[in-house]
Amino acid sequence: MTEKNFIPSSYSSIIKEGNVTWQAPSNIALVKYWGKKEHQIPANPSVSLTLSNCATTTTLNYTKKNVETADFSFELWFEGQPKESFKPKIVKFFERILAYMPFLKAYHLKIETSNSFPHSSGIASSASGMSALALCLMSMEKELNPEMTDDYFYQKASFLARLGSGSACRSVKGSIVAWGNHQNTKGSSDLFGIEYPYTVHKKFKNYQDTILLVDKGQKQVSSTVGHDLMHNHAYAAARFKQAHENLSRLQDIFQEGNLEGFIEVVESEALTLHAMMMTSLPYFILMKPNTLQIINKIWEFRKATQIPICFTLDAGANVHVLYPEEVKAEVLQFIKSELVEFCENNQYICDKIGSGAKKI
Ligand code: PMV
């Protein structure tokens, strides 16, 4: 499979106008993607849990233009208001995908998008947002080419989403998604995410993710800059090798239902991600004092109760608390009594493992 598989040869139908809506979830990586090559090719494979409640809903209205213009012609609405500031990111995305969606300049597009999670909660919407938009564009392509198979539809949606934001390719299908070539994962690809293809023990079904909103502000360093700093990073080679090993370890852990192993891999991955930031040149820190307070509290609680809760982090200060559904009541009680005080405005979001994007 190469990029060329996603270049359409011709379309069998002609459409004048239409509209489609997709809701795509966010995802949280267990093995982290940090470092990339050209065209959003990951420097190492990653695996994520698809979330359920944190999602972006996007409606795409398309109208065929009388004459094709040299520029992309589109409007962007965010939560009911025109949003000019999002447009440059979309133009960049359209430029990257034009070779795979040659019809783009023949239409005027109206993109209306909104998030289920609070605006400026410090939760990145790029994964769910790019996935929802990619899926809408695929629905449009399916109108032009109704013979398209479902496999191709979802694979290409993930492929396109990746070109918008790497981790977005893991927000299309499946409750556990692997992305990036990995020797022990059949069907894995650098080009798109795949549904995790092996057995997962029932202990991981309905896994919970409570997101503690430690800092809702804008990140000081974007993930684009962070990924770039992995070039010439002193520990890059060892880190990329470790991600491959952790993915293999997780396969056994998933199969056996080994919660202790899960905790070790997941927390180590989170801290390694932040260690890479701290050892970049220039170096930076995205954790806040309250992030560390929460981590220490989680460790104390786990030791005292033997309840298998653990944390992970994305590229920011917020903490994702992961735990099996059966201990939900105790963990929520602990979060309310001991962790909420470290959250900005006491805010947190209760989420859980989901099943992928939905057409609405
Ligand atoms: O998709 P990006 O370029 O925003 O990178 C996301 C990177 C992490 O969230 C830190 C890790 C991951 O695998 O999602």
Image (cartoon, helix red, strand yellow):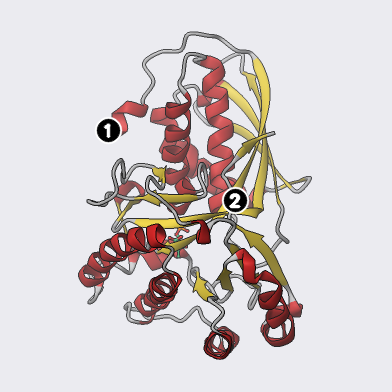
Q: Is the residue marked 2 within 8 Å of ligand 1, measured from its CB?
A: no
Residue position marked by numbered label 2 in the rendering:
354
**Residue depicted at 54% across the width and 83% down the height:** 306
Q: Residues within 10 Å of mark 2 (few under 14, many from 20)?
A: many
**Residue depicted at 45% across the width and 40% down the height:** 158
Q: Is the residue marked 1 within 8 Å of ligand 1, measured from its CB?
A: no
Residue 216 showing in the rendered view:
yes
Above or below residue 205? Residue 88 is: above
Element at label 2: loop
Residue 192 figure quarter: top left
Image location (x, y in percent) of residue 80: 79, 45
- Judge left or right: residue 110 versus residue 181: right
Which amino acid, mark 1?
Met
- Judge left or right: residue 200 versus residue 185: right
Above or below residue 192? Residue 101 is: above
Name the one closer to the observer, 106 or 121.
Answer: 121
- Judge left or right: residue 161 versus residue 324: left
**Residue depicted at 52% across the width and 31% down the height:** 71
Residue 357 figure quarter: top right
Image location (x, y in percent) of residue 18: 67, 20
Q: Residues within 10 Å of mark 1 (few under 14, many from 20)?
A: few
Which amino acid, mark 2?
Gly
Image location (x, y in percent) of residue 152: 42, 27
- Judge left or right: residue 335 versus residue 160: right
Name the one closer to the observer, 102 or 85.
Answer: 102
Above or below residue 19? Residue 222 is: below
Judge depth for marks 1 and 2 and give the one in front. Answer: 2
Residue position marked by numbered label 1 in the rendering:
1
For the C terminus, the image quarter is top right
**Quarter of the rendered image showing ligand 1:** bottom left
Of callouts 1 and 2, the N-terminal one:
1
**Residue depicted at 73% across the width and 74% down the height:** 347
